[in-house]
Image: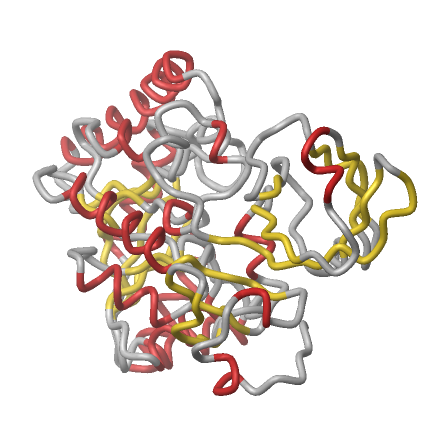
Amino acid sequence: MIATDARPSNLIGAELAEIDTPALLIDLDAMERNLRTMADFFADKPAKLRPHAKTHKSPIIAHKQLALGAVGITCAKLGEAEVMVEAGVDDILVANQIVGRAKIARLMGLLHHARITVAVDDAANLRDLAAAAGAQGVELDVLVEVNTGMSRCGVEPGEPAVTLAKVAADLPNIRFRGIQAYEGHLVGIADEGERAARVAAAMAPIVATREAIERDGLPVGIVSGGGTGTFALTGTTRGFDEVQAGSYVFMDGAYGTVGGVGGRFAQALTVLATVISRPTADRAILDIGRKTLGTDQGVPFLKRFGRSDDVTFEGFSEEHTKLRVAGPARDLRPGDVVEVVPGHGCTTVNLYDRYVAHRRGVVEAVWPIAARGRAQ
């Protein structure tokens, strides 16, 4: 949890240099441009956008996505879905398995207030869900998750998926809606040609599985998958209906290097940091670290210098970040405030309680990150 002394109302109208650090910033012009760019892409496509809220964790941003034509919202966890339902989002895919008595009970409660779809890959879990739904007098929509080669959750394509789809279709209080197939292991491939070829190879068995289920007489209403790195591929693949891209809303250092994606969307999310030490001519220390910057993937960079060799991120402690500086970056001094584009936006967002949203450097709003920490 990031603690600050300033009340949110005191920040409205402030310039960035006046904000205490660390702070998580949204450039509103950049974010709104990203939202429109993705919405425009899907406006004339058979597939539609169901953006993933695990990136922003904000009902305010989710409603902006819905207003631009998204057919619903995707969540990673049931806790995130609860936050979204409380904020009036009424069509949610939880792109995960809901297992265990406590979570299933919470899921059934949500079904009285919104349409919730969940991923399944196990017949016993399906029967547990059906029994709980029957006891509550509700119906639950499910997508059979199919392995795309990511080898995380999911049954294998072909007969295993067809068999599980039949189980779902035969159970009372369960509505089989289709397939979830997320190619997350391919979204970060930098080369466009390689990424396109590997996505096509991964999706061919998924489309064939859809056709096999339909040949058995079960309608497949939705095949859902895709991410920011593959939205233009899965979003135009015959047999795909929904794309779950999420990081496009902010972008980050990792996605900025993905060909055909990094130049399409703007970097809207930054961490405001202060230079607290210049112990040598070529070393600078920032007041952020692993507790305030997602360091699990991607390379961060200073917005002021871009992806320049003038600044190299050399190491992260809990509360410190070590920079190797050269050229113009040697002019950094203690007290200077800089914006850091995180390597991974999703894990960075989850470290903060609120966004400081600015337009052209002046704070316009302070938004709670309502679903942060909702890991259950």
- State the quadrant of the N terminus: bottom right
Q: Nearer the viewer, residue 42 or 274?
A: 274
Residue 212, position as x, y percentages in the image: 21, 29
State which quadrant residue 159 falls in: top left
Q: Nearer the viewer, residue 257 or 63?
A: 257
| Horizontal arrangement in the rendering, residue 209 relative to residue 302 (left or right) | left
Residue 52, position as x, y percentages in the image: 38, 53
User: How many labels were placed on the picture?
Assistant: 0
Determine the residue positioned at 76% across, 53% down.
Answer: 286
Q: How is the image coloured?
A: secondary structure
364, above or below 39, in the image: below
- State the quadrant of the C terminus: bottom right
| Horizontal arrangement in the rendering, residue 241 relative to residue 126 (left or right) | left
State which quadrant residue 324 falls in: top right
314, above or below 75, in the image: above
Judge whether residue 126 can be spotted in this image.
Answer: no
| Horizontal arrangement in the rendering, residue 288 relative to residue 44 (left or right) | right
Query: Given the current orientation, which residue lies at the most extreme left position?
Result: 44
Determine the residue positioned at 85% across, 53% down.
Answer: 277
Q: Nearer the viewer, residue 198 or 222?
A: 198
Determine the residue positioned at 46% across, 57% down.
Answer: 54
Residue 147, position as x, y percentages in the image: 44, 33
126, above or below 257, in the image: below
State which quadrant residue 349 falls in: bottom right
362, above or below 238, in the image: below
Q: Nearer the viewer, residue 3 or 306?
A: 306
| Horizontal arrangement in the rendering, residue 191 relative to residue 139 (left or right) | right
Determine the residue positioned at 51% across, 80% down.
Answer: 11
Judge whether residue 206 can be spotted in this image.
Answer: yes
Residue 345, position as x, y percentages in the image: 53, 50
